[in-house]
Structure formats: structure tokens, C-alpha cells
Image: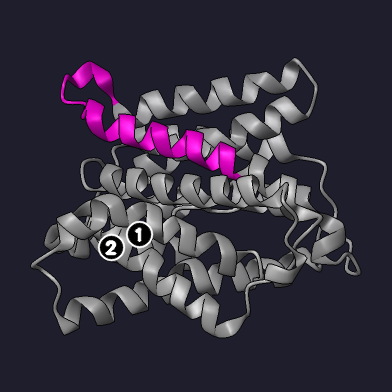
Amino acid sequence: MLSVQLSSALSVELISAVGPAGTAWLRLTMGALIFLALARPPLRSLRRGDIPVLVGLGIATGLMTIAFLAAIDRIPLGTAVAVEFLGPLTVAAVRSHSTRALLWPCLALLGVVLLTEPWHGHIDLAGVGFAGISAVGWAGYILLTQRIGDRFTGIGALSLTVPVAAATAAVAGIPQASGHLTPGILATAVGLAVLMPVLPFTLEMLALRRMTPTAFGTLMSLEPAFGVLLGLLMLHQQPSPTQFGGITLVVLAGAAAQRGGRNHPQVSAADAGPAPVPKEL
């Protein structure tokens, strides 16, 4: 989570140079090249039915990344992460098949209202909208990942989907970044790609070998808090007491929606199956 949010905070400077779509394209492209260098795409294992899911997953990842970066260009990082977190939180609540569990997304939504403080009259609707699009993309990412979770393990699937995500982002990213690329910007993009997605996905695979997806998801509920922390330390985005209360509600709602997970040291990533993971690549 620290790596993911550090990458997001550091991306703000790159966004000012090449735009949100340009930043998404550069990060995803560098990430794709790194994954292709680390693992061969499992092309021989592909079935006809896998292709639409993998392509859909890549497109969703590309659009979600552009939307999230567009959001943090307009609203504080912690607020953007909290709004985006509504996606996986809603998926977790619906999957629980419990009417009571639907209270947790509502609690998180209340937290988002406290974060955005609409009564002050200066809410950036476009920024919140972009974060909302990213939330829908994150929810779709989780559902599509589950579809292929039993077919592909490790980073093999990433060497298939991240290039598709990069190609998706290229549609808007290349025109936006055109004329602004320098060796320094390309080097920055490589560093950001290491921070997200390369390092987090590697750590997630190691974590999922040692805990259940529910326990993993419970810990991941701290993601919005990390967003606020990095926004404060690196971007000097100071939340008000009301906003601090809002982020607390989002974190509590996320933990409550995932409660019940226990550590199982011998569970492998393949046995554990997919879990909600940060998708703002």
C-alpha cells in the first residue's frame, strides 16, 4: 500500500508535464516492458474463452488508471482513494449475500461526503466523477480477475493484461504526452512503474501465499488511510477534522466488510484465489 500510494503521490509532478492520460500511458508501458522481461506471456495456455476476459481486464485497467490519475490531478489523493475504494467495498458487500453487509458501502459513502465537504460549495465534481469511474473500474477488475484467477497464476497474466492496458491508455496518452517526452520523464516513468505495478503485485503474491483473501482484503481497507498519509507528507494536503472523520469511516467500513479472515500459512496464491487489489496502475 505504501508503494502504491507513493507512486500516486509522485505521479502528480509527472501529470503536470504530460497530463493524466500521458502519465497513465508511460507508467503502464514501462510496467508492461518490465513484466515482459520478467515472464513470458503464457500464450500456449490461452483458450478462446480467455481472450475476451483478458482483453476486457486490460481495457478496464487502462481506463481505470487514466481516471484515477485525472482524479488526483483535481482532488486530494486521500479523497480520490476513498472514492475509488467504494468499488471493491461494494463488491465485497454484494458477495457476502447479506443485506446487513450493504450498510458498509453506505457508511463509506457517508465518509466520502465528509471528505468532499459539499456544504462548502467548492467540490470538484469532475475530480469526484473521475474517481467514481475508477471505482467502477476497480470493481470490474476484481470480477474479471476472478474469472481468470483459476487459469493463470503468478505474473504470467500480468504480462498479458498490462500490455493491453498500455495500448488502451495510448489512445489518449500518446497525443497528450507528444512533444513533452524527455530522458528525465522516461526515467521517472520507469521508477513509477516499479513502485506500481511491479513491486506491489510481487508483494501481494507473497502475501496471498500466507493469508486468506478475506484477511488480505481486511488489511487492504487501510488503503485510503495510506492515501491521506502520503497526500499529507508529500503533497501537503492537510485534511480537516471533518475529513479525517470521513476517512476513518471509509477505513472502518472496509474492514467490517471483509471481517472474518484468518491467517493460513500454507495457502498458496492459486488456492487462495483472487483478492481485491489496488488497480491504479
Amino acid type at image mark 1: Ser
Single out the residue that lies furthest toward the left.
Answer: 179
Residue in view at x 24 percent, y 26 percent: 125
85 displayed left or right of 235: right
**Residue at 65% from the left image edge and 44% from the top image edge:** 144
Q: Give the class, few, some or many, for how many residues have Cα within 10 Å of label 1's Cα (few <14, many ≥20).
A: many
Q: Name the residue under label 1.
A: 8
Displayed quadrant of residue 10: bottom left
Across and down, in percent, residue 270 comes to 83, 62
Q: Position of residue 17 (x, y in %)?
A: 13, 63
Q: Are the two marked residues, 1 and 2, in contact with CB atoms closer than 8 angstroms?
A: yes
Q: What element carries label 2?
A: helix
Q: Where residue 86 sits: x, y (%)?
A: 52, 33
**Callout 2 crowding tier (Cα within 10 Å): few <14, some 14–19, many ≥20:** many
Q: Would you say residue 186 is visible in this rendering?
A: yes
Tell me: residue 271, above or below residue 195.
Answer: above
- Provide the residue designation for mark 2: 11
Range of the magenta residues? 117-141
Give the numbered dot on residue 174. Answer: none
Magenta-drawn stretch, dominant element (helix, strand or loop): helix
**Residue at position x 45%, y 28% in the image:** 111
Q: How far apart are marks 1 and 2 (CA)?
A: 5 Å
> Which quadrant would the C terminus be assigned to in this image?
bottom left
Q: Which secondary structure lies at badge 1? A: helix
Image spot of residue 208 (x, y percent): 76, 63
Q: Which amino acid does label 2 sit on?
A: Ser
Quarter assignment of residue 140: top right
